Image (tube, rainbow, N blue to C red):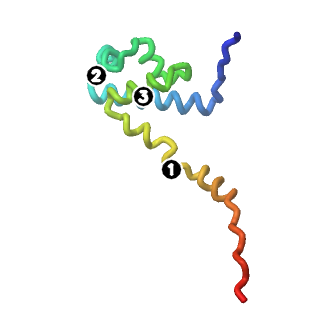
Amino acid sequence: MSERSTTPVPKLLKILEALGENIKLARLRRKLTTGQVCERADISRTTLWQIEKGMPNVTMGAYAQVLFVLGLENDIMKMGADDELGRRLQDANLEPGKRGPKKK
């Protein structure tokens, strides 16, 4: 069985890089070492390095663990909360209901 892999588009890679940089800055603001974060998140230093570089091959769970250690777990809940495009698409597909019978 062959393994499937995805190749992220360049725009997504830039977003992941920005996310990784934000995570690194959050760690530094809290004056936490890589060792402390790795121990608390139960991940390897290599994984933390990959997260801080915004590499797409790291699991979502590892990102979530690091965000939890940094006290930023509630930021995960903000993703997709204000789905403006999705709501517009949903509203565009709504069909008006049929009219009721005319009163005599």
Residue linked to disc 3: 64
Tell us which disc is closer to us: 2 or 3: 3
Observer-side mark, 1 or 2, equals 1
Front residue of this view, candidates 24 and 84: 84
Residue 82, disc: 1
Residue at the image position 38 percent from the left and 29 percent from the top: 67
**Residue 4 appears at what percent x and percent y?**
67, 17
Q: Is residue 29 left or right of residue 66?
A: left
**Amino acid at pointer 2:** Leu
Q: Which disc number belongs to residue 32?
A: 2
Distance, label 1 to label 2, CA atoms, is 32 Å
**How far apart are the two marked residues, 2 and 3, measured between alpha carbons?**
17 Å
Image location of residue 56, percent across then percent down: 55, 23
Labelled disc at residue 99: none
Q: Residues within 10 Å of mark 1 (few under 14, many from 20)?
A: few
Quarter of the rendering containing residue 49 = top left
- Element marked by disc 2: loop
Q: Residue at x 56, y 30 (%)?
A: 14
